[in-house]
Image (tube, coloured by chain):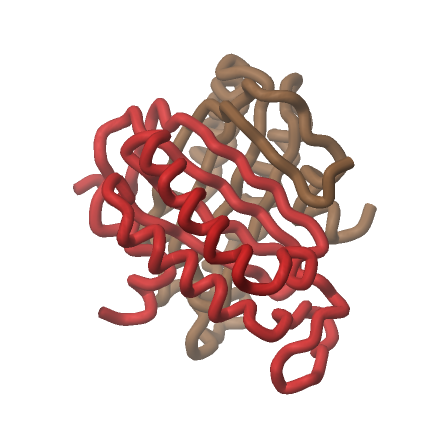
Chain colours: A red, B brown
Amino acid sequence: MQSSETKSDRRERLPEPPYFAVIFTSVRRADAESEAGEVSAGQAEAAPGYDTMAQRMLELARQQPGFLGVESARGADGLGITVSYWESEEAIRRWRDDAEHQVAQALGREQWYAWFTLHVAKVERAWEFPVR
Amino acid sequence: MQSSETKSDRRERLPEPPYFAVIFTSVRRADAESEAGEVSAGQAEAAPGYDTMAQRMLELARQQPGFLGVESARGADGLGITVSYWESEEAIRRWRDDAEHQVAQALGREQWYAWFTLHVAKVERAWEFPVR
């Protein structure tokens, strides 16, 4: 469907907890050049290959049994947050193993990120507005 | 300090799990006008009072015992994700009670958001790059 679904296909379904969330927060390298070879002021551009890698990671997630959805936002300051939701920790592990294999074949993470954190968390309660 | 700290003061400290995360994902109302009275194409502008409310929510969080940090990003498509981290569920409850009281005194959420979800989750594992 539209690009809005790409950003958050989570809006289509909110299962009953418990389930799991993977919170990936990152700051892109300020000195990483875009494929166009320029760095804009105030926003870090992705290194070559970044978009391909990010897209591939998402594709891998969607293919995994137990994948529930994903939300992603990156602000003008270069800080990005991606939250993916999963039925089980086993589903997360399968995705991680696949993803690590893929990323290992691409360039290192150091090329893309100045900093990142990864949190695996068990969702205990959830609300939605408007209520369906 | 600087605005980068406002966006993510989380980078300064990453405690050992378990602790808690509140994941707030929202889409701003496309028809909400900014205080300047214009709506830019491709990005939903906040309704009047939104920035004040959001700032106040953050101030309240920082004042709570057990607050560990916050990360926030909103993309050009209007989808925003804010993750706050907490030592305990009790700390989250205190913040929620304070925040609800404050927001009740402001305009309704319906004015700002077309949609949002709120997840409370227990962080079980966490990684950081580069490793400190």
In the rendered picture of this protein, how many numbered marks are placed on residues?
A: 0
Taking the view exactly as shown, the residue that stands out farthest to the bottom is A36
Residue plotted at (55% across, 72% down): A49
Q: Is A112 rendered above or below residue B117?
A: below
Spot occupied by residue A64 in the image (x, y as percentages of width and height): 28, 47
Q: Quadrant of residue B13?
A: top right
Q: Quadrant of residue A107?
A: bottom right
Spot occupied by residue B116 in the image (x, y as percentages of width and height): 35, 46
Residue plotted at (48% across, 18% down): B93
Q: Is B69 rendered above or below residue B129?
A: above
Q: Is residue B111 rendered to the left or right of residue A16?
A: right
Give the camera-side residue of B38 and A127: A127
Q: Is A84 rendered above or below residue B114?
A: above
Give the camera-side residue of A77 and A32: A32
Spot occupied by residue B77 in the image (x, y as percentages of width and height): 43, 67
Q: Is residue B57 rendered to the left or right of residue A1?
A: right
The quarter in which the C terminus of chain A is drawn is top left
Give the camera-side residue of B92 and A49: A49
